[in-house]
């Protein structure tokens, strides 16, 4: 009995020493480098991201492996793979960094400030206005680290379902999913044509005549195309696209080049309208009025940075865009 007690006591005494030894040899820089290599699956790409040379990255990983007594990555052929120990460490590092972000927010709150990280995802139709909003938001909350990713609607829905981002800015929010949506900005879709188009010879153009004038549209599933299709369905109009293009920018330049007409977000063509390269066609039942919304899963925990952004767009976006559009 005594020997068992002695062995147990020695084991329990040794364990904290081992942990203390690991802690004394670990650094947050090593964990940051490991996290980058794990996410990018490349020493070189991790170095580019962090401003380090490839040998410096290798050195940090080697020191981390020595501290933990476990290999974290291995090469098979010329490909880099993460070991089981590395995958387990990645889970812990994610938790550690998440806690640090919360700690940063809490400390900022104690000082009466809002800080932390805010990862926004925006559909492509919103890219024309989001940078302008973020400039004012950044001026109000300079300690919030902002990042914005622009994707199409299909990708936005996928990332929203997987909770990959803090907040998503999109239109046409699905109502059959457990999402919370805060409408904050008018997204007016206007019928446009080149300034010299024959349609401008008429004071009023029927929707059918406009839609039959070589209509250029986005790919199926995009928010602007879905809005147009729903509008036409409600008014019993037929949509017969002459050409599909992968972005509003591509459609805008195609219209300017004389390839056809289109229905585009007004905010995406402000400069072209001002310069006279495009004109809004006076079409029955148009323009289409929809909202952009900030969307997130209903059960999502809202950080102080997320709450600050939601409050900001709800109370400032509309007046800001009115200033941006002017008399157009």
Image (cartoon, rainbow, N blue to C red):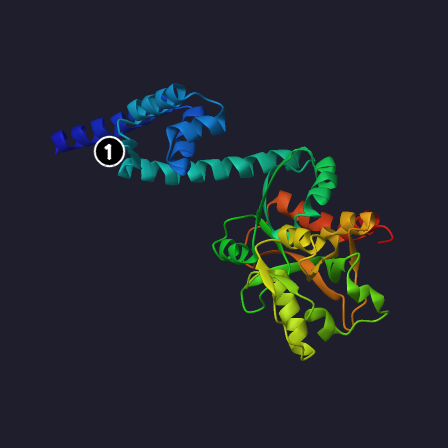
- Of residue 235 and residue 159, the one placed in the foreground of this image is 235
Q: Vertical placement of 131 versus 191: above or below?
A: above
Q: Residue at x 43, y 39 (%)?
A: 94
Quadrant placement of the N terminus? top left
User: On the rendered structure, is 201 left or right of 70?
Assistant: right
Q: Please tell me whether residue 4 is drawn above or below residue 238 in the rendered image.
A: above
Q: Residue 5 falls in which quadrant of the image? A: top left
Considering only vertical position in the picture, is 204 above or below 61? below
Of residues 303 and 130, which is closer to you in this image? Answer: 130
Q: Is residue 31 visible?
A: no
Residue at the image point whose x is 58% and y is 65% from the top? 174
Q: Secondary structure at mark 1?
A: loop
Q: Residue at x 29, y 22 (%)?
A: 66
Q: Position of residue 88 (x, y in %)?
A: 32, 39
Circle 1 sits on which residue? 77
Q: Quadrant of residue 216?
A: bottom right
State the image quarter where residue 84 is shown. top left
């Amino acid at each position: 009995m005594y020997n068992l007690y002695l062995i147990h006591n020695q084991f329990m005494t040794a364990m904290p020493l081992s942990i203390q030894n690991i802690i004394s040899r670990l650094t947050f820089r090593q964990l940051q480098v490991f996290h980058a290599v794990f996410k990018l699956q490349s020493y070189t790409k991790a170095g580019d991201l962090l401003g380090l040379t490839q040998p410096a990255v290798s050195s940090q990983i080697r020191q981390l492996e020595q501290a933990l007594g476990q290999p974290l990555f291995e090469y098979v052929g010329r490909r880099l793979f993460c070991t089981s120990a590395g995958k387990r460490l990645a889970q812990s590092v994610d938790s550690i960094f998440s806690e640090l972000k919360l700690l940063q927010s809490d400390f900022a709150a104690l000082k009466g400030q809002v800080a932390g990280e805010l990862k926004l995802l925006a559909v492509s139709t919103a890219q024309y206005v989001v940078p302008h909003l973020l400039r004012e938001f950044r001026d109000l909350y300079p300690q919030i680290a902002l990042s914005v990713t622009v994707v199409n609607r299909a990708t936005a829905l996928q990332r929203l379902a997987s909770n990959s981002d803090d907040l998503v800015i999109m239109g046409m929010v699905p109502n059959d999913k457990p999402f919370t949506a805060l409408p904050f900005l008018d997204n007016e879709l206007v019928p446009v044509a080149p300034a010299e188009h024959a349609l401008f010879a008429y004071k009023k153009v029927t929707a059918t005549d406009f839609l039959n004038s070589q209509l250029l549209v986005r790919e199926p599933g995009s928010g602007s195309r879905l809005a147009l299709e729903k509008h036409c369905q409600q008014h019993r109009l037929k949509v017969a696209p002459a050409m599909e293009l992968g972005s509003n920018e591509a459609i805008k330049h195609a219209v300017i080049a004389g390839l056809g007409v289109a229905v585009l977000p007004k905010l995406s063509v402000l400069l072209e309208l001002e310069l006279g390269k495009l004109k809004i066609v006076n079409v029955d039942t148009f323009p289409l009025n929809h909202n952009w919304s900030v969307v997130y899963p209903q059960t999502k925990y809202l950080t102080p940075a997320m709450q600050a952004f939601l409050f900001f767009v709800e109370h400032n976006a509309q007046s800001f865009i009115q200033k941006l559009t002017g008399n157009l």
